Image (spheres, helix red, strand yellow):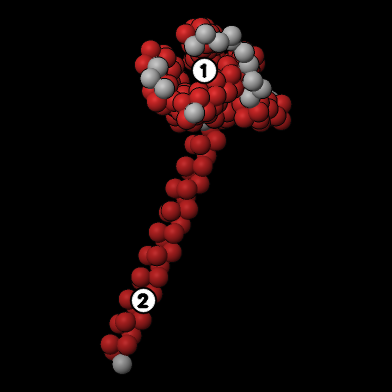
Amino acid sequence: MQESSLKGLYLKELRDIYDAEKQITKALPKMAKAAHSPELKEALKEHLEVTKGQINRLEEIFGILDEKPKSRPCAGMKGIIEEGSEFLKSDKRASDENLMDAAIIGAAQRVEHYEIAVYGTLRTYAEQLGNDRIAKLLEQTKQEEADVDRKLSSISEELLSASPAMGEEKEEQAGGQESNGRKRAGRSQANAEHGRARARR
């Protein structure tokens, strides 16, 4: 009974992520089109091909389970993608292309983190059900998602370090620190003078 219940949950999650991956294949081309950085565009296009392979892998898993590949509407992924789409519409005229691309990466990484969590859970279910072959396939997909997440983080760091807005913020912070330093020096000098005056009295 416990195995049957876990298997039911397992299939439900598989159908959920199957739908999520299909949603992602529709979202990635839009994100790649909106991106300015050639490196980011290429990374998103590459991930689209990886995602198609992951869909094929899920269909293989359904076959191993003697189940027909079937989607279950994934509300979680739908919400994440819709949030990213709203951002692209509202900020498409942003003057800082690097910041815009960094925001696109942020939206893409929310997708990746969702997938990493789901595939990790599914791998655990497969292991509990004794489906070692399926567990290895799911772990392979999980690692692919983690690799993409790391690559996107690297691109984001490069974009932010080259962003004019970040340069201005660093200058403002440096100016603020310099001002605070002068204030502290002034207070120290005033305290010293006060101390000398008391000593003379």
Given residues 39 and 16, the one toward you in this image is 16
| Residue at 59% in and 9% down | 68
Instruction: Check disc 1 and give the amino acid type.
Output: Leu
- x, y percent for residue 132: 36, 16
Given residues 86 and 163, the one toward you in this image is 86
Q: Which residue is mark 2?
A: 191
Instruction: Identify the element where label 1 is drawn.
Output: helix
- x, y percent for residue 143: 40, 20
Instruction: Identify the element where label 2 is drawn.
Output: helix
C-alpha distance separating marks 2 and 1: 55 Å
Is residue 40 something that shows in the picture? yes
Is residue 36 something that shows in the picture? no
Q: Which residue is mark 1?
A: 40
Where residue 158 sits, quadrant-wise, is top left
Residue 63 falls left or right of residue 70? left
| Residue at 57% in and 23% down | 12
| Residue at 44% in and 59% down | 180
Instruction: Check disc 2 and give the amino acid type.
Output: Asn
> Closer to the camera: disc 2 or disc 1?
1
Residue 193 falls left or right of residue 65? left
Given residues 124 and 27, the one toward you in this image is 124
For residue 7, above or below residue 65:
below
Residue sitting at the far front: 1
- x, y percent for residue 64: 47, 8
Residue 184 falls left or right of residue 57? left
Q: Residues within 10 Å of mark 2 (few under 14, many from 20)?
A: few
